[in-house]
Amino acid sequence: MRRWPLRAAEHALAAPVVSGVLAGVGTPHLAASYLGAMHRVLPVTFCTVFAVSASGRIETVSAASTYGNTAERTSERYVAQRFDLLDPNMVWLAKRKLPKRAQLWLGHQRAEEVADPAYRAACYGDVGIRERASILLLLPTGQRTAVSFYRSLAQPDFGDADFALLETHATLLADATLAHGRSAMAAREAVEPTLATRLLALSLREREVIGHLMAGKTAKQTARELGIELTTVRTHQYRAFRRLGIGTLKALLRGVSPVVSP
């Protein structure tokens, strides 16, 4: 397993590759676009795109494979079982000191180098993957992103020429992934305000109650810490939920998923 830093550089990129990569920005087919575009110059089996916020929340998930929906199913397991907490790339990025400007690396990892057996089986062994090469991006905000390309057991190992191709296209793929994140955020903002914006509509006491609940406190603990009755906490919670457009505590902890009113 190894990683090395990349520097932004001007390269002459093939127009079909550039247009193919950019075609997925702002769509549900980001990884499929990357895979199709890069497959013109680099034979690979899977492509995955993961972006994690500084707080550890997974913000972008996209996956594609050259056959069926194997990569998509694998990414679902990755997210559901929080393999990002075991992923050497994500763990390494999370431990790094925040940079003053965006930093890029290229990483290479073989299946046998994955320590956790469940993670290794789900993302490599069970789906016939030999290795991955990843473009890693760390932002000053703490957001960490990995754009990874995978080769199956039937394909040759990544070599120096393959790494050189990935280095050449690293800035393009990183910029496209950032643009996709901004596009997705803008789309969400157009449909619904952020939680922070919604909280401004609450009364001070309602915000206090919601803040305690978001911190994992129970209604009883919230009542005790705020010095008010449990029934009062329930009343503030009910009113706050109505204003936030949610119906359950689970929805609040997920990040405020709106409930459509009849």
Image (cartoon, rainbow, N blue to C red):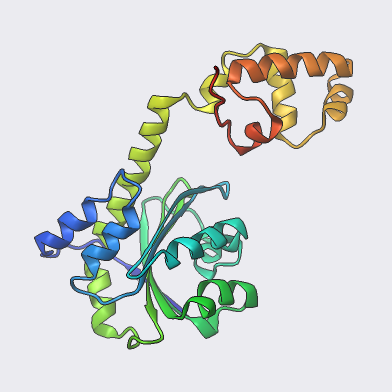
The x and y percentages for residue 63 are 40, 60
Name which residue lies at 60% across and 15% down. Answer: 243
Q: Is residue 219 above or below residue 39?
A: above
The x and y percentages for residue 150 are 38, 74
Name which residue lies at 63% across and 16% down. Answer: 242
The x and y percentages for residue 157 are 35, 87
85 with respect to 143 (left or right): right
Name which residue lies at 36% across and 87% down. Answer: 154
- Quadrant hosting residue 16: bottom left
Q: Is residue 259 above or below residue 181?
A: above
The x and y percentages for residue 145 are 43, 56
User: The C terminus appears in which quarter of the rendering?
Assistant: top right
195 with respect to 148 (left or right): right
Q: Is residue 116 visible?
A: no
53 with respect to 174 (left or right): right
- Quadrant hosting residue 37: bottom left
- Quadrant hosting residue 230: top right
